[in-house]
Image (cartoon, grey):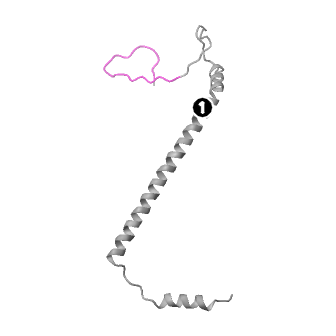
Amino acid sequence: MRIDPNQQKLFEAFARRQARPLSPWQKIVGSVAAIGLFGLALVFSVVVFAVVLTVGAAAGAWFWWKTRALRKQMREAQPGRSQPGQSQEGLVIEGEVIREVDESEPEAPGPRSR
Protein backbone atom coordinates (compact mmCIF):
# COMPACT_ATOMS: atom_id res chain seq x y z
CA MET A 1 0.00 0.00 0.00
CA ARG A 2 1.35 3.38 -1.00
CA ILE A 3 1.43 6.16 1.64
CA ASP A 4 0.76 9.70 0.48
CA PRO A 5 3.61 12.01 1.61
CA ASN A 6 1.18 14.87 2.33
CA GLN A 7 -0.84 12.71 4.71
CA GLN A 8 2.39 11.48 6.29
CA LYS A 9 3.41 15.12 7.01
CA LEU A 10 0.00 15.88 8.48
CA PHE A 11 0.17 12.97 10.94
CA GLU A 12 3.74 13.84 11.87
CA ALA A 13 2.66 17.42 12.61
CA PHE A 14 0.01 16.14 15.01
CA ALA A 15 2.53 13.81 16.63
CA ARG A 16 5.04 16.65 17.25
CA ARG A 17 2.50 19.05 18.75
CA GLN A 18 2.24 19.02 22.52
CA ALA A 19 -1.25 18.68 24.02
CA ARG A 20 -2.37 21.79 25.88
CA PRO A 21 -4.58 21.50 28.93
CA LEU A 22 -8.09 22.81 28.38
CA SER A 23 -8.84 26.31 29.56
CA PRO A 24 -11.69 26.84 32.06
CA TRP A 25 -13.76 28.38 29.25
CA GLN A 26 -13.31 25.26 27.08
CA LYS A 27 -14.26 23.05 30.02
CA ILE A 28 -17.45 25.04 30.62
CA VAL A 29 -18.43 24.99 26.93
CA GLY A 30 -17.71 21.25 26.75
CA SER A 31 -19.79 20.57 29.86
CA VAL A 32 -22.72 22.63 28.57
CA ALA A 33 -22.53 20.83 25.22
CA ALA A 34 -22.46 17.43 26.93
CA ILE A 35 -25.46 18.34 29.12
CA GLY A 36 -27.31 19.63 26.04
CA LEU A 37 -26.64 16.43 24.11
CA PHE A 38 -27.78 14.35 27.10
CA GLY A 39 -30.98 16.43 27.30
CA LEU A 40 -31.67 15.94 23.60
CA ALA A 41 -31.09 12.20 23.91
CA LEU A 42 -33.47 12.08 26.89
CA VAL A 43 -36.20 13.98 25.03
CA PHE A 44 -35.75 11.76 21.97
CA SER A 45 -36.01 8.60 24.07
CA VAL A 46 -39.18 9.84 25.80
CA VAL A 47 -40.78 10.63 22.44
CA VAL A 48 -39.81 7.21 21.05
CA PHE A 49 -41.19 5.50 24.18
CA ALA A 50 -44.48 7.41 23.89
CA VAL A 51 -44.83 6.50 20.21
CA VAL A 52 -44.08 2.81 20.87
CA LEU A 53 -46.51 2.76 23.79
CA THR A 54 -49.26 4.40 21.72
CA VAL A 55 -48.75 2.06 18.77
CA GLY A 56 -48.69 -0.95 21.11
CA ALA A 57 -51.90 0.13 22.84
CA ALA A 58 -53.62 0.70 19.49
CA ALA A 59 -52.49 -2.71 18.20
CA GLY A 60 -53.68 -4.38 21.42
CA ALA A 61 -57.07 -2.67 21.23
CA TRP A 62 -57.44 -3.66 17.57
CA PHE A 63 -56.53 -7.29 18.38
CA TRP A 64 -58.94 -7.34 21.33
CA TRP A 65 -61.73 -5.93 19.13
CA LYS A 66 -61.10 -8.40 16.29
CA THR A 67 -61.12 -11.45 18.61
CA ARG A 68 -64.25 -10.61 20.63
CA ALA A 69 -66.47 -13.03 18.68
CA LEU A 70 -63.95 -15.84 19.14
CA ARG A 71 -63.76 -15.18 22.89
CA LYS A 72 -67.56 -15.27 23.11
CA GLN A 73 -67.66 -18.64 21.30
CA MET A 74 -64.99 -20.03 23.63
CA ARG A 75 -66.92 -18.91 26.72
CA GLU A 76 -70.11 -20.54 25.43
CA ALA A 77 -68.32 -23.80 24.57
CA GLN A 78 -66.67 -24.31 27.98
CA PRO A 79 -67.47 -27.78 29.33
CA GLY A 80 -69.13 -27.85 32.73
CA ARG A 81 -70.27 -24.28 32.47
CA SER A 82 -73.95 -24.04 33.27
CA GLN A 83 -76.14 -21.62 31.45
CA PRO A 84 -78.79 -19.71 33.38
CA GLY A 85 -81.83 -21.94 33.84
CA GLN A 86 -79.92 -25.22 33.40
CA SER A 87 -79.31 -27.76 36.17
CA GLN A 88 -75.80 -28.32 37.47
CA GLU A 89 -76.04 -32.08 37.32
CA GLY A 90 -72.72 -33.71 36.60
CA LEU A 91 -70.74 -30.71 37.86
CA VAL A 92 -67.70 -31.88 39.81
CA ILE A 93 -65.83 -29.47 42.02
CA GLU A 94 -62.62 -30.88 43.41
CA GLY A 95 -60.74 -29.37 46.27
CA GLU A 96 -58.95 -29.91 49.51
CA VAL A 97 -60.02 -28.88 52.98
CA ILE A 98 -57.56 -28.22 55.74
CA ARG A 99 -59.10 -27.99 59.18
CA GLU A 100 -57.27 -26.78 62.22
CA VAL A 101 -58.40 -28.46 65.41
CA ASP A 102 -58.27 -26.57 68.66
CA GLU A 103 -56.82 -28.85 71.35
CA SER A 104 -59.14 -27.47 74.02
CA GLU A 105 -62.27 -28.65 72.18
CA PRO A 106 -63.33 -32.31 72.56
CA GLU A 107 -62.70 -34.39 69.47
CA ALA A 108 -65.73 -35.44 67.44
CA PRO A 109 -66.26 -39.17 67.02
CA GLY A 110 -65.36 -40.63 63.63
CA PRO A 111 -62.31 -41.02 61.45
CA ARG A 112 -59.35 -38.92 62.44
CA SER A 113 -58.37 -36.29 59.85
CA ARG A 114 -54.76 -35.50 59.10
Q: Which residue is mark 1?
A: 64
**In the depicted view, which residue is nearer to us: 98 or 101?**
98
The x, y position of residue 42, in whole percent, is: 44, 55
**In the depicted view, which residue is nearer to us: 93 or 40?**
40
Residue at position x 45%, y 89% in the image: 17
Residue type, label 1:
Trp
The x, y position of residue 77, in whole percent, is: 66, 20
Viewed as shown, does residue 35 lie left or right of 66?
A: left
Q: Is residue 38 above or below residue 94?
A: below
Residue at position x 39%, y 63% in the image: 35
**In the depicted view, which residue is nearer to us: 72 or 58?**
58
The x, y position of residue 47, in whole percent, is: 49, 49
Q: Is residue 17 above or below residue 54?
A: below
- The stretch of residues the image draws in magenta is 95-113
The image quadrant where one finds the N terminus is bottom right
Q: Few, some or many C-alpha atoms within 10 Å of disc 1 (few <14, some 14-19, many ≥20)?
A: few
Assess whether residue 105 is covered by the magenta stretch. Answer: yes
The x, y position of residue 87, in whole percent, is: 60, 8
Q: Is residue 72 above or below residue 25?
A: above
Residue at position x 35%, y 73% in the image: 27
